[in-house]
Amino acid sequence: MNNVVLVGFMGSGKSTVGRVLAERTNRSFVDLDDEIAADAGRSVAEIFADEGEAGFRQREAQSLRRALDKQDIIVAAGGGAPLADENWRRMREGNCVVSLMAQPVELARRLNGSKGRPLLQPDVPSAIATLLPNRLSRYAAADLVIATDGRKPDEVAHDIESRLPRSGIHRIAVDVPGASHEVTIGQHLPNLVGETVKRMAPSQPVVIVSDRVIIKQHLRPLADALKSMDITAIPVSVPSGEPAKELDALAAIYAELARIGIDRQGCVIALGGGTVGDVAGFAAATWMRGIRYIQMPTTLLAMVDSSIGGKTAINLPAGKNLVGAVRQPAAIFSDIEYLDSLPNEEYRAALAEVVKAGMIADRRFVEWLAANIAGLLQRDNDSLDEAIRWAIRIKAEVVARDPAETGERAILNYGHTVGHALERAAGYGTVRHGEAVAWGMEVAARISVLTATCQAEDVTVQHMLLQQAGLLARRPTVKPLDLLSAMQHDKKSRAGKPRWVLLREVGRAEYGCEVDEAIVWMALREVLGI
Ligand SMILES: NC(=O)c1ccc[n+]([C@@H]2O[C@H](COP(=O)([O-])OP(=O)(O)OC[C@H]3O[C@@H](n4cnc5c(N)ncnc54)[C@H](O)[C@@H]3O)[C@@H](O)[C@H]2O)c1
Ligand SMILES: [Zn+2]
């Protein structure tokens, strides 16, 4: 975990740069070829001679596994190591992969006269010409791709050091058929975003949609990282909060895309909370019938919920999220550092969605939350990192199984039948979404007990967690009839009858449930006092 893995062709400088980088960052250094030779008690050339390339590759995979079990080290991997999918997967899990690149002539110059490299046959230029083309796409897919031509090892090491994330990075696949992508979670990720943009849209500016608050606080490091990679980034500002999702804000984004001349190869970055993600995603989903976009969530809610799943939407005066599209992002980068500036109320409100994820899908997560809620409330980095990853994994799995919400994805709406209705009945902006959802979860849990789909003990942990997060401190005041009418408006209702997501037990929910109106009223009265 939290290792840096250097990959690249022979002669790209992995061992030399690796040693300098290790010294600069105060980490240990492992040269994989040296490890393999030490383990075998023979040189790499001898292993090739005795066991062939296949034998060497087997030893290489073993040594790599052992090296990556360590923490905070710099590993120089052999030039062919990243080609095996299993090695590549291991290199990336929890670690940052950096590839060192050089032009073939430069590689040939550096490798001239080198000994003990069995693959440099029959001569250096021919070996480069045969091997390099097959390896380039893997090298280019690294988190950071560093050109080394004409640069001293110290300079290259300094460059890498300044671009590295601050801690280990984690990746969660969102395996939506035909639109599979990854969530990268870590700290200080703008340089990794830059590499992704460079791979996706190398020839045109990238548009960063963000709101005024975030532009002021967080745009700079991202813009600088993109600039350092010669990517032109053009920020487009939308208002902060729900007004970002109004038609005017959307029109302003379209106008900017037109002015810059973004075509179908273009790319949009959504840097912000759920509102920015929704409007920027919708703009991307509809511009030229759909272009690629990257989600960079800056709120806890956006990290654990709205950035995943590809739902995008804007609001109309007639209602929230009435116009929308489902389009998966090309990538999601959840940089936890952004949360440092997030106001406490926003942070706490999002914990409702975190608790929701556990209650509907994973008992172990709920148990973990119960044991770690204090740390989470204090924003302890390790607890936060763990909770975010867990919640993302849950949503990613549900979405991958049912991207178009024809079935199971509906469980994510647990607590939202009453939650959305409370927001609507109280007037948007009066009650925070997370607080409304917390109350909605309490009502849904109560209904689950009243209809005997779930045991009373199973809902107490939810109550305790929401209460500790301070989400049940104030009962929202709404008129019963307003709430009822808002519930009938719910997008998930059928013929004006809401469909409920109810609990079966901690970690298991059921969707599409019809509930007798008398029971709904009873639960509303007991929980909300109306
Ligand atoms: N697409 C989906 O699947 C989905 C799911 C859930 C919610 N949503 C939508 O998400 C929206 C709510 O998202 P949200 O809660 O992130 O709200 P938001 O985007 O309005 O952000 C909340 C506030 O925090 C500020 N902010 C954002 N990041 C900050 C940071 N790092 N530091 C300081 N301030 C910061 C914003 O400027 C804003 O004022 C709603 O519109 C909802 O409909 C969408
Ligand atoms: Zn929600």
Image: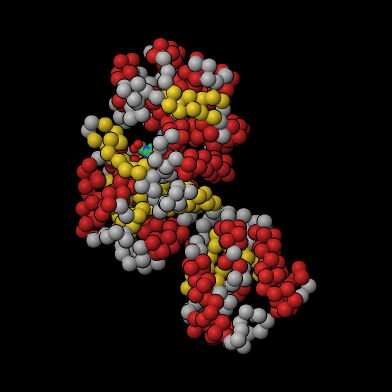
- Give the residue displayed 51% in from the left and 57% down from the top: 165
Q: Can residue 111 be seen in this view?
A: yes
User: In this rendering, is residue 206 above or below 314?
Assistant: below
Residue 424, how many percent across, how many down? 31, 26
The part of the image, by quadrant, that contains residue 20 is bottom right
Question: How many marks overall?
Answer: 0
Residue 34, how many percent across, how many down? 70, 72
Q: How is the image coloured?
A: secondary structure
In the image: residue 445, left or right of residue 294: right
User: In this rendering, is residue 211 above or below 164?
Assistant: above
User: In this rendering, is residue 46 above or below 367?
Assistant: below
Residue 225, how many percent across, how many down? 41, 61
- Give the residue displayed 24% in from the left and 45% down from the top: 249
Q: Which residue lies furthest to the right in this view?
A: 41
In the foreground, 395 or 184: 395
Question: Where does the N terminus fall, quadrant-wise?
Answer: bottom right
In the foreground, 79 or 31: 79
Question: Where does the C terminus fall, quadrant-wise?
Answer: top left
In the image: residue 154, left or right of residue 428: right
Answer with the quadrant where ligand 1 appears in the image. top left
Residue 36, how many percent across, how many down? 71, 69
In the foreground, 197 or 310: 310
